[in-house]
Amino acid sequence: MTSSPETVFDLLIAGAGINGAGLARDAAGRGLKVLIVDQGDIGGATSSASTKLIHGGLRYLEHFAFGLVRESLAEREILMRIAPHLVREQRFVIPHAPVQRPRWMIRLGLGLYDRLARGSSLRPAEPLNLANTPLGLPLRPEFTRGFAYSDLAADDARLTVLNAISAAQLGAQVLTRTKLVGAQRTGSVWRAVLQAADGTQRECAARILVNAAGPWADTLRRTLVAAGDAPALRLVKGSHLVLPRLYAGDHAYLLQNNDGRIAFVIPFENDFNLIGTTEVTLAAPQASPHIDAAEADYLCSLAGRFFRASLAPSQAAWSFAGIRALHDDGTGSASAVSREYRLVADGGAGEAPLLSIFGGKLTTYRRLAERVLDRLRPWLPGLRPPWSAQVHLPGGGLGAHGLPGLLLELARRHPQLPPELLQSLARRHGTLAARVLGQAQTEAELGTHFGADLYAAEVDYMSAHEWAQTAEDILWRRTKCGLRIDAAGGSRLAQHLGEMGGRA
């Protein structure tokens, strides 16, 4: 941290998941002095363990959450504009069986979904005869009818880190592997103690403290203030499996279970399908959540009822789980719990405020940041107006020709590099791929090859500009190369990071 002891930040944000990183970006862009800290990596918990979708939430219509769906669909359009390299249209197929929701209900819901997204550039919903289309080929023969609709697939971890990068470019200070271990009010200022991974501590001062700790938000709030009433929380673990490809094509499937729950089967990293999510209520946060045997069996059983291919948990190439802190509205099932966020302020007249964020979803992070700053406006006189919907995230300024145009330009500048490598870099970095490549004209000039499409040039860039310190940061969050890199490649990567001063 480069500030002097006398520096007083406007905002100290605890938690660098998507909500914290998005808030840091918005606030820094409005001229505020921002410090954001996280006890782990950027997006190292819930924000990198989602189903990788930017969506309105079709199933939320069943619970009459029309406002949330409308807001989410509006944010979906904004993200297509500001992060076109990270999101892409994802067409979903909904196979229908009579024992599930009736066809009229699905048709009505999809019509309302399209109506709430009026003006969207995505394709509208349509009915399908699955017996007469390749979309039905992977399915069991009893599924002859269905529907198709569109949402967005996205890279959640990179969306989070690009918000942090943007925040830093705008003047925010970003500290990872740094925990907020205590804070006390001194009148209108918070005096906070931060502890690094090596145990060293430092102090900082901030006018406002924002608690964006996700599943740990309630715990952190209660350690900082004599907490009064707060939204009742339900901690819900969502787990996913990644299996070898079940079918050809770029389409995804939405599967309905007989108990009303749903799961998605989504193309993932070209050669795989992502299947999820489960919803398991927890009594307390878990530091390292993972899928359990019952969840894996549930996902494979549900998918097996729809697909011709036989599925087993042992086929999984990867699995991951995350914990969402949802506002508990007393609903019986976890799937019915509201995904709307709640903001809770603590602090009396003349006291430095603590604002805690409870709930939320990946899709609405940007709008949540605006709402937080609106709520804090009384403590931020002269706050500049909202801006983040109009400005690309780093690498997102692709121009009129979009990603294809960027790929053509990269191929022109680096004709000897494999097209597949250029495409991977463009997807991860957008226009910043040119900085990653530098003047390299051959794979050898990119440095050590760790496997798949990962070279030292990109690792060094991520270490220098994206706070990546460990092999896990690189293999599973900044990229998904862990799906294709063997143990020897992982060891070489860890050694390389150690030589650079990172953490193996």
Image (cartoon, rainbow, N blue to C red):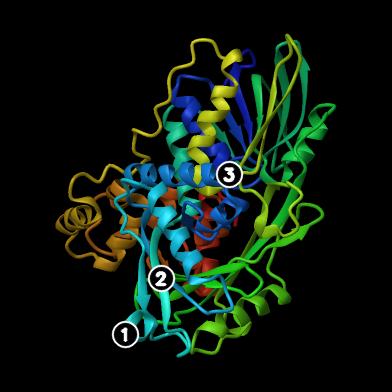
Residue name at image x 32 percent, y 82 percent: 134
Q: CA distance from mark 3 to mark 2?
A: 34 Å
Q: Which residue is mark 2?
A: 147
Quadrant of the image occupied by residue 491:
bottom right
232 with respect to 462 (left or right): right
Q: Quick one: which residue is furthest to the right in this view?
A: 226
Quadrant of the image occupied by residue 212:
top right
185 with respect to 295 (left or right): right
62 with respect to 445 (left or right): right
Of the numbered discs 1 and 3, the one sitting upstream in the chain is 3
Q: Nearer the viewer, mark 3 or mark 2?
A: 2
Query: Picture coordinates of residue 159 (x, y %)?
Result: 46, 48
Q: Nearer the viewer, residue 206 or 152?
A: 152
Of the numbered discs 3 and 2, the one sitting upstream in the chain is 3
Q: Could one spot residue 282 in this view of the protein?
A: yes
Mark seen at residue 17: 3
Q: Nearer the viewer, residue 493 or 137?
A: 137
Query: Picture coordinates of residue 30 (x, y %)?
Result: 45, 21
Q: Secondary structure at mark 3?
A: loop
Residue name at image x 43 percent, y 54 percent: 113
Q: Nearer the viewer, residue 43 or 55?
A: 55
Q: Are marks 3 and 2 in contact (CB under 8 Å)?
A: no
Q: Nearer the viewer, residue 481 or 110?
A: 110
Q: Secondary structure at mark 1?
A: helix
Mark seen at residue 132: 1
Relative to 209, does residue 179 appear above or below in the rendering?
Answer: below
Amino acid type at image mark 1: Asn
Q: Quadrant of the C terminus?
A: bottom right
Mark seen at residue 20: none
Q: Quadrant of the N terminus?
A: top right
